[in-house]
Image: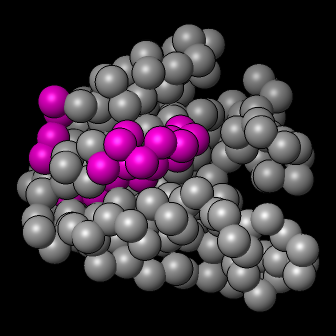
Amino acid sequence: MEEVPRLVTSAVALARQVGFPLTRDEAGPGRPSASLPDTGRFLAMLAAGCGGGRIGELGTGAGIGAGWMASAMPADCVLITAEMDVRLASAARQIFAGDPRIEVITGDALAVISGRGPFDLLFADSGVRDVSDFAALVSLLRLGGRIVMDDVTPRHILPPDSPLRSHDVKRQFFTGEPRLAWAEVVLPDMRNSLLVGTRTS
């Protein structure tokens, strides 16, 4: 795979064109941002192993995460990505128009992804904040399927008084879900990490 795949380059250009933040620092609190390059490379590595399978993404954004996964997934794999913002979904659809394996759906991500599984890989990038919604996502995974959440701050850089030390919703999702074996993966910048779980039951 190319260092930065063509689809990713196109999605980054789209993000700049429509003003979609490329980093959490650009986005500010409570606003979505694009997948970081190291997140993309990790997703691409997982997608490469989904032969004959199905990948789902909740929150297309400008299509950067989808671009990484689509560029690495096998020819017999399909990718379904959902975005609530009509303008972003429409723009991302243009990026992937030449690849029939990729479907960009407009609508509430969890609602439109449900019923499209089972999935080999789910990238939950849409701000899921409810335990029951997270459990529903795990139910959409096949046994051995993986779920990934990004935009996690590694514990070692959290200030001593950070509320995330005692109440981190994403970590609580993974810790509290008995069907997952999971781990936190700290990215090379040491400022961001991913939570990755594999469905075991």
Picture quadrant of residue 109: top left
In depth, the one of 199 and 7 nearer the eye is 199
Relative to 149, 165 lies left or right: right
Q: Residue furthest front?
A: 166
Q: Residue furthest bottom?
A: 156
Where residue 12 appears, x then y in whole percent? 69, 43
Res 7 visible = no
Relative to 198, 150 lies left or right: right
Name the residue at 72% across, 43% down.
33
In depth, the one of 160 and 68 nearer the eye is 160
Name the residue at 45% across, 60% down.
173
Asked whether residue 122 is drawn in magenta, I would say yes
Res 143 visible = yes
Where 134 falls versus 46 (above or below)? above
Where 36 falls versus 182 (above or below)? above
In depth, the one of 89 and 143 nearer the eye is 143
Where residue 185 appears, x then y in whole percent? 54, 81
Picture quadrant of residue 16: top right
Which quadrant does the C terminus fall into? Answer: bottom left
Where residue 149 appears, x then y in whole percent? 50, 59
Name the colour scheme: one colour
Name the residue at 29% across, 79% down.
181
Relative to 149, 139 lies left or right: left
Relative to 151, 201 lies left or right: left
Asked whether residue 127 is drawn in magenta, I would say yes
| Range of residues picked out in magenta | 115-135
Where residue 30 appears, x then y in whole percent? 77, 39
